[in-house]
Amino acid sequence: MSFFSPKIRPFFRNLGVISLMLWLTIFVTYYADKLTRRDVSESEKTSAKTTPKNEVSSARLMTAAEQEEHVDFQLYGYPRDRYRIGTMLSEGDTSLLCGFQTDFRTDLQSAFGDVISRDSRDEPKREAIESALLRHFDGKSSRALSLYEASLNADREKGIRLMDELLDLPKEERMPLEALAKYRRARLKMSLEDWAGLSDGDMRSRLRSIREDLASVPDHARAGSLDPAKVSENAAYWIAYSSSMILPSRRLIALGEADYGGAVETYLRMPRRGEANAVNSCLHLLLKLCEENNLRPALAGENLRKLMTYYLASAGGDFPDTRPASDILKASSIAWLDLLSESKTDPGFALRHVAVLQYRLERWQDCRDTAVRLPKTDPLRQLLLSRCNLRLTGDLSASRTLLEGADPAKSIAASAKTTPATGFYNYSVIIDLQSETELRERVSGERGVLALCAGEFPEALRLFDEGRYAEDAFYVAECLMPLDELKAYVDRRRSAKAPLIKYRWNYGNNDFDDLEYELCSRLMRAGRTEEALDYVNSNIRAKTASYLLLLRAAERTDVSPLERADSYWRAALLVRQIGETVLHSPYGLSWSSGEGWRVGYSYIPGFRSRSFEYPYGVPEMAVLTCGAEELRRLREWESQHMGSSARYERDARYAAFDLALNAARLLPDNDPAGAEILQYAGNLLKYREPKAAVPAYRMLVTRFPRTPYGQHAIAKKWFSSDRPSPPADILSK
């Protein structure tokens, strides 16, 4: 049979048609894609044309404050998030005994903000220089240009020879590139790798030639030599570098070629060039001196002394790449304090920072002597004197007096036989010495814990509140204060027209960030609902009022069971939204998968009473002891909240569950709406705490057995997997 017989021809015909359609599809897809790309490309071109204008426009609209903030970011980078102990109590003794660490950024701005150059210059990158040369010569041949371009691709030594050759050209040939050639020759000499093998004489000679070249660059630029990206201005920075960081500090000093004080003054005033700016340059110099274990040069000049002290007090500043290793930091801090003492340098140039450094290095007596010199109104003085007293004597009463600004001699003299506070804490709290508010809040917080240890609960609450120590304030308000005393405090706060203190602390999904809301919660739980409404969060006041009206309507006996059931059901849905704020305590029990019920949120009640076991360490509280009266009140609170079987005060799910069951009880047997409500209620707890969901299951199988949900519950002996969301009006339709 022929291969092309009539029987086979249809097969090839169909194959050809399929192939044609395939190629046609490919062609259409390609063409459509091309059109789309063209549209995208044209839109990108349009965007490219308009975007710069928009950027310029937005830049022009930038306020002076925004521009200042932008410059600060370029100079200093992001400020480090200051780790302020958000609670005193959950950190235990550490909160009063740990060291302090200053904020380098704010210190630098405060001391040198007027000195540090805020001007910005383009970096003298190769691309910028080559572009300037192309524009100047515009295709004209030049021996000087050829030599300069050749040096860009040569090694260091050959590059230096090429610059020597360029600078030997006749004046008219070399003049356009004279500034660039000397700048490049100097930079190439600086980067040579044979420094360690040079004799003292050769090293001095090379440093002299480098500085001569760099110093002449501005003169050549003024005489008409090309100066792309203001290379002439950058020359001063490299002169400073040659007298501070080009060699190990001891070698540079031995050669008589060091000038650390002058270098710092140059760095502080240098314009910003990307990463190269005043702050970074100073930090790199400080790091170099610390790593070389040679801090003596930092005594040269008041500004350098300040910078080194700020640097060490802040644990190496805010930048990881300019922060020394912890062992080097500690050794440098000790060496610096010893050097100041040995040289009889008065610490008055940076008194607060020296005191902070002394405390962190456990030089309690030295710190006390330094802190006494601070103004009596300085909150740092109060903090350090109080802490030094704790370290030297362990007397809480004397420390409390010192925090209030008393004479340290009298306070400490009265406590000679007390047991010293011991224990080393290998971390520090970051404080901003430039923020009077932050320091005073810290004083208030530390006074608060000492008042608490003395059993003065209203005073402790006031101090925690004023210091914005949210969790500590809420602990006292919830666990230790009688309800009427708490209400009296909040009312006094109101009458003084003090603004609501926003702690930036959320509980659950709702704001719970002021003591007024804590008072509302306690009043609601105590059944004083009318009073509670006056303190509720304004964001949910309308819903809370509706909730209370619905509860009142549900308890009426002069209306039909269906109307009462409707009120209960609507109240159940509302409490799911607002219950975390209007009912629950942040220190009540909380549910955690695998742990079940536990002391909620920050564990402070359990830490203080030692009545609960935790899978992790409990902070030491040998200093911040829990007094007998605090423990008695805390035990009473625990028996009411931890020992109670009622869950509705602890989780909105339980409150909604109870209200939904009340609604279902009032409905007729086998009412489909009732079965749906019970299924909804069961879903709230069946995974969280199955035993707690059993009442809804029993009601479902006994009262609503003929409904689909009831039949499923009977057959499977548990709730359906369905998750219905019955509407609020399911019973009123």
Image (cartoon, rainbow, N blue to C red):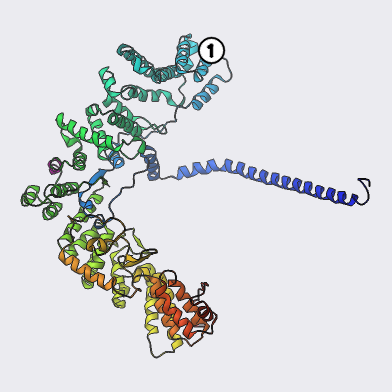
Instruction: Pick the residue in front: 554 or 502.
Output: 554
Q: Quadrant of residue 182?
A: top left
* Location of residue 505 with respect to 657 vertically, above or below: above
The residue wearing badge 1 is 143
Report whether 483 appears left or right of 279. Answer: left
Rendered location of residue 725, percent (x, y): 50, 73
On whether residue 334 falls in the magenta region, the answer is no
Instruction: Pick the residue in front: 15 or 575.
Output: 15
* Location of residue 688 with respect to 127 vertically, above or below: below
Q: Quadrant of residue 304?
A: top left
Which range of residues does the magenta coloring cover? 368-373
On whether residue 369 falls in the magenta region, the answer is yes
Hey, which residue is sitting farthest bottom in the picture?
558
Rendered location of residue 671, percent (x, y): 51, 85
Q: Is residue 174 visible?
A: yes
Residue plotted at (16% across, 41% down): 363
Amino acid tagged 1: Arg
Instruction: Pick the residue in front: 302 or 645.
Output: 645
Rendered location of residue 347, percent (x, y): 17, 35
